[in-house]
Amino acid sequence: MPHGIISLNIGTQLNIQLKGTPCFAVTKDTKVRSGLGLVSLRSVSGMFSYPDILVVCGEPEYFDDQGDIIMNPTAIVEVLSKSTEAFDRGEKFQRHRTWNPSLYDYVLVTQDKALVEHFHRNADGGWDMHEAIGLTEAITLASIACTLKLADIYDESNSLNPSTTGER
């Protein structure tokens, strides 16, 4: 349950801050390109993934006429779980870096403590990482002009998640 609460808290904060801008946030039911394309007529393995939260700026670009795979994410947020953490940090992030040149911010949110890792594409195409630890910290996603306070991200999940309680 903390995963859902944290995701909703982030989505809510992004929606509030993106109001009136050309950017919008959507939740995990949206496919994002993360690979080359069709592997075979029966397999699309690795072609797309479902981020927990996705921000697109401007008109969405789609892979095909079906309009169900976004090609131009600006920011992606993943709320880590034990079963997905290694993939979200490793192969999934590598795929997004490779196949989404529009991606500027990739955020990993730990759900059992107040810890957020923010990766940002810099001017030369490399990636820088900033770590925010504790409920008094915040991260700024410059590409979408949004700031996420960890106190807001973890709000309400603390009562369900004892390991973050002591940091308030």
Image (tube, helix red, strand yellow):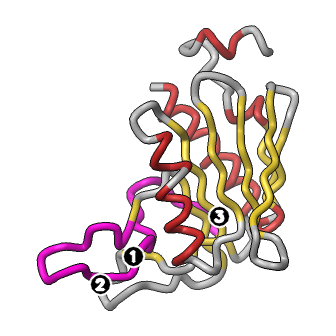
The percent coordinates of residue 142 (x first, y second) are: 83, 64
Q: Which residue is mark 2?
A: 66
Along the line of sight, the residue nearer the viewer: 82 or 53: 82
Q: Residue 55 or 33: which is nearer the viewer?
A: 33
Specify which label sits upstream in the sequence, 2 or 3.
2
Q: Position of residue 135 (x, y in %)?
A: 80, 26
Q: Secondary structure at mark 3?
A: strand
Q: Secondary structure at mark 2?
A: loop
Q: Nearer the viewer, residue 11 or 80?
A: 80
Mark 2 surroundings: few (<14), some (14-19) or many (≥20) residues within 10 A: few
Three-letter amino acid code at the position of disc 2: Gln
Q: Residue at x 40, y 62 (%)?
A: 49
Between disc 2 and disc 1, the foreground one is 1
Residue at position x 69%, y 35% in the image: 153
Q: Which residues are magenta?
A: 24-48
Q: Amino acid at mark 3?
A: Ala
